[in-house]
Image (cartoon, helix red, strand yellow):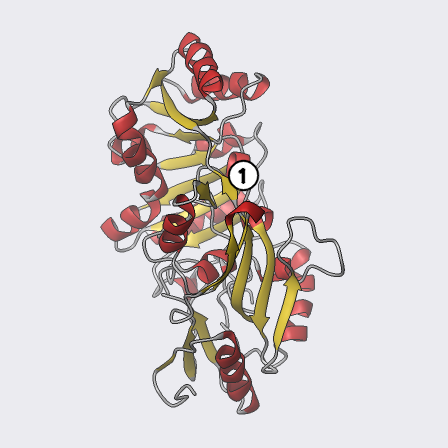
Amino acid sequence: MPDYFTDVVEPRSPEELAEAMGWASARHQTIELGGHFSKRLMGGPAEAANMTISTSAMRRVRQYEPRDLTISVEAGISYCELSRLLAGHRQMIPLDPPFADSATVGGMVACNCSGPRRRLYGTARDVVIGTQFATLEGKLVESGGMVVKNVAGLDMSKLMIGSFGTLAAIAVVNFKVIPQPPCERTFRFAFASLDEALAARDAILKSPLDPAAIDLLNPLAASAAEIEKQGNTLAVRAGGNAPAIARYERELAAMGAEAVPVNQEGPFWQAIQDFTPRYLAAHQDGAVVRVSCTLKELGAVMRPIPGPAIARAGSGVCYAYFEHSGDAAVFAAETAREYCETVVEFAPENRKKEMALWPAPGQDLEIMKRIKHMFDPECLLNRGRLYHRI
């Protein structure tokens, strides 16, 4: 049984997690919930709590049959450990989250983290097929299952994705896994202007090609990522059989792309995936603003960004980087007038309470508050973590 009077409670099973949640709720104790807490700078400020519950000791693989293309794991297993296990069977869960070296699966799902390959494979909502979560009533609730298509009943697991642990504690996650492509290659373009880069992006999207990732880095981001040919860099990641890759090589070369040497492909994408943690480590007052927009609007979002910017150019998600959090707050407030899906995604913990992290949440916020009240009527769990709104 966990010792509930220590600084951090670390349940070793879903049952112990539910017991800890129920114990705290029965005594009206506020709870800080997390895994390795690798993303404290993400979302809202971590309000002071009576106790901390970490799922980091829950690392078991509950069920895995490679031929079924599904896996069930406890929330505390790290994304890297899970990726290594799947890679042994040439399978993957291509979410590419930031802070992947330390992120737990539960934290990655709770924060709805994704990376370059979301263009083809989507986000956690597209690969999570079920969850088990512990409520403040001390109960374990299962939603979904271990089959890819499951349409029976309300899929409550979707509520857990992106909730920042404000509703319940994720104990187990069931994933749909993806076979690794037989071959992969990376191509890059360098353009003098943003408009040229976007025109190339549009040409790729209109073509029969279907790359896994299309990322756009402005010159400052390309320089910080130490990409050889800088300027406005368009990076394309493609997978498939040998004839498919040969077609990518022909058609993208005709558009002006060059292939990244095979031995540099891993470091190339790692630099893009890790851009956020490296930037925040180098800038004590740094902040990151995320703007979601249409593909057509992406140029208008990126042009006024004064610092580095990286866009999932095939998905319409842009990340703007600021050395000073105050500048990020001003940019977010101004941008939210045009694009309501704007948040200050990362900011220093000591600055968050004075910032409007989610300037224009829209009418959905009231529904979110009602759902929060259903799960946590006393507001005990991860108070303020959902961008200081919930």
Total numbered circles: 1
Name the quadrant of the C terminus: bottom right
Visible residue check, residue 206? yes
Residue 102 placement: quadrant: bottom left
Residue drawn where x is 37% and y is 56% of the image: 347
Asked which secondary structure carries label 1, the reply is helix
Is residue 167 shown above or below 356?
below
Q: Position of residue 35 (x, y in %)?
A: 41, 67
Q: Nearer the viewer, residue 106 or 194?
A: 106
Q: Nearer the viewer, residue 178 or 289?
A: 178
Q: Position of residue 226 (x, y in %)?
A: 24, 32
Residue drawn where x is 44% and y is 37% of the image: 116
Residue 389 placement: quadrant: bottom right
Residue drawn where x is 51% and y is 55% of the image: 64
Name the quadrant of the N terminus: bottom left
Is residue 111 shown above or below 23?
above
Visible residue check, residue 316? no
Q: Nearer the viewer, residue 144 or 268?
A: 144
Q: Where does label 1 land, which residue? A: 121
Q: Position of residue 90 (x, y in %)?
A: 43, 40
Q: Is residue 271 left or right of residue 28?
A: left
Is residue 221 shown above or below 70?
above
Q: Amino acid at mark 1?
A: Tyr
